Image (cartoon, rainbow, N blue to C red):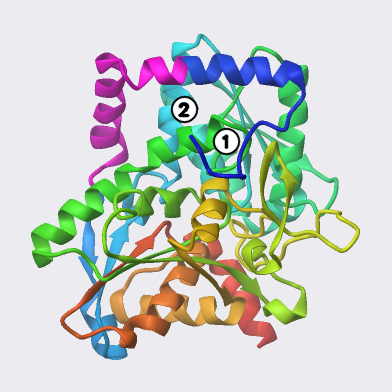
Amino acid sequence: MNYGEFGGQYVPQELKEKLKEIENEFKKAIKDKKFIKEYKYYLKQYVGRPSPLYYAEKLTEYIGGAKIYLKREDLNHTGAHKINNALGQALLAKRMKKNHIIAETGAGQHGVATATVCSLLDLKCTIFMGSVDIERQHVNVEKMKLLGANVVSVTRGNKTLKDAVDEAFDYLLQHKDSFYLIGSAVGPSPYPEMVKYFQKVIGEEAKKQIIKQEHKLPKAIIACVGGGSNSIGLFNSFIKEKVDIYGVEGAGLGIKSNKHASAIANNKIGIIHGMKTYIMQDKKGNIKDAYSISAGLDYPGIGPEHAYLNKIKRVNYDSITDKGAIKAFKLLTKLEGIIPALESSHALAYAIKIAKKYKISDCIIVNLSGRGDKDLQTVLEFNKKH
């Protein structure tokens, strides 16, 4: 896949050989009717797809702008979009006779999804997670352990998502029999392409659903962006349509505070985790620590396709602060009885911000990428301080 100057394989030669093997098998698998049939069977009967496209009537009324629809990825088995990709890659690993899955996780949702599909498909599972994230996502850690995964606490660097990815890549180089199941649309090729393929079901469903419910396309679609898998999954079906597309990163304590996770706002291009993309980089060229209240957004880079879509100005990338996300989290919970993940709350906050730009006859779709029970402790702690 061509992402202009972005993407690529900036990895050691021995890893390139492994990636070539994965890419060749992936290309064969997606043309294999038996593989696709099995994948779709599990999506429907195990994950619970299609996920609903819900008209948030009370929220819409409260804001007074365009109709807001929520793509309910929070209703998937394990509570987020992550399982779409975890399932696809795990089936690919099994096809390749790789019986040991390794993965990284930040918010814990990808870790839970990976541990879940490993349990389902009888695969050994090792999850790398920063020690800081282990503390703030304790419930998800316990779920992973119950599912049979070995959770490895990563204590280097900032002890968050970037460091978990670093650790997983190191392990992959040392253990040739393992399969690295990357959770976001990041990393060396073919990972961004694979993750997009297994997440594009989100946009495919949303497009059909909105046309059925509104008899037209939405005026805008919005999703949060850490690495960017839930967003690329939604965007894929609308890129060629006349639809405004918004990707929302974590602004943390504010872009000017330097405590944020917006690689686009940082506007530096460099190499991270085997790919060329926008990264959080200081004046000396070192990777800066990203910060967001949301464990899934504090990644110091962005997927290469997002970098490309920003460069060609097809997608509008912006950011929302911790404060804005918490406000949206509380508002949706109170008005609609839906507790969103803090990651998704960033996209929701942005939808609230722009809804009045559109006519009341227009509609916009927000990808509600996950549920927020994992974030309750974080929100309670935020409330104590503010």
Rounded to the nearest angstrom, the CA distance separating label 2 from label 1 is: 9 Å
What's the residue at 11%, 67% (across, down)? 214
Q: Do the residues labelled 2 and 1 touch (CB within 8 Å)?
A: yes
Circle nearer the N terminus (2, 1): 2
Q: Position of residue 92 (x, y in %)?
A: 45, 20
- Secondary structure of the residue carrying numbered label 1: loop
Q: Can you see residue 347?
A: yes
The magenta segment = 25-50
In the picture, measured across the screen, residue 296 lies left or right of residue 171, that is left
The image position of residue 296, as x and y in percent, is: 59, 56
The one of 16 and 300 positioned closer to us in this rendering: 16
Q: Where is residue 301 in the image (x, y as percent from the top left)?
A: 66, 53
Q: Identify the residue position indicated by label 1 in the image.
A: 182
Identified at 47% across, 25% down, the residue is 90
Q: Does the magenta stretch include residue 30?
A: yes
| Residue 295 position in % (x across, y down) | 62, 58
Numbered mark located on residue 89 in the image: 2
